[in-house]
Image (cartoon, helix red, strand yellow):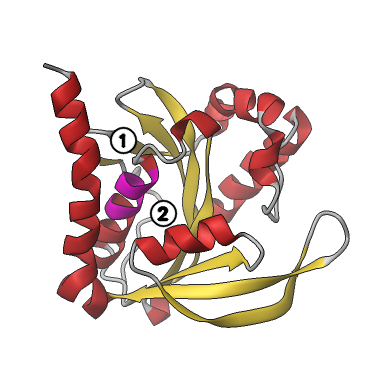
Amino acid sequence: MKFNFEYNYYLENDFVILEPLQESHFDDLLKFSLSEPELWTYSLIKADSELNLRNYLNLALKGKEHQKEYPFIVYDKINKCYAGSTRFYDIQVENSCIQLGYTWYGKQFQRTGVNRHCKFLLLEFAFKILEAERVEFRVDNENKESIDAMKNIGCTPEGILRSNSPKSDGTRRDSIVLSILKKEWKRKIREELKQKCQPLKALMETSSH
């Protein structure tokens, strides 16, 4: 697997742009911290205040500097505004494995198709450009909505990591592990996810007439 951490990767289609996350994006994300703190209910790193958002950005950018993470900010081209953030992390170049997570969107962008378009771009990039063999996802086992979303894009559940991460309230969480392999993506999942993105495309084309 190959990954150039110095390069500014932009992933884009007709509906979203994934831009490299920068410190200057603080103001673009602050509105979510101040008005939608519930977005981080299941997050290991909360960004539900100005201070916590600054820490969130610093940790993400430090992970990129150490060549372990590559964070993006998500721009919604239909609504012409930033919608949330996501990232690659635990990037194992030598093993051709990568994790995809730390994903969140403001409430108005949830269940709009933004997530499906972002996941398609990220997975296509991981398997086609980076030449990854495996993309892994880890989700709080209590976060049933996110687990269902992962299964819906084609992820295979692999098992539960018991008490593997501390939560902000001092307790520990169980994490479910899901994944997509390159051969699965190429054989079936890519086309299925592409088709699931079509209803949004059709809707936008209809509304523009």
Who's the residue at 21% across and 62% down the image? 192
Quadrant position of the C terminus in the picture: top left
Tell me residue 91's x, y (percent): 47, 67
Tell me which amino acid carries mark 1: Val
Nearest the viewer among 54 and 124 is: 124
Q: Main secondary structure of the magenta part?
A: helix
Who's the residue at 45% across and 33% down the image? 109
Q: Is residue 13 visible?
A: no
The crowding category of the residue bearing disc 2, from other C-alpha atoms within 10 Å (few below 14, some 14 to 19, many at least 20), is some
Tell me residue 155's x, y (percent): 39, 70
Mark number displayed over residue 16: 1
Residue that mark 2 sits on:
5
The crowding category of the residue bearing disc 1, from other C-alpha atoms within 10 Å (few below 14, some 14 to 19, many at least 20), is many
Nearest the viewer among 49 and 201 is: 201
Tell me which amino acid carries mark 2: Phe
- Extent of the magenta region: 115-120
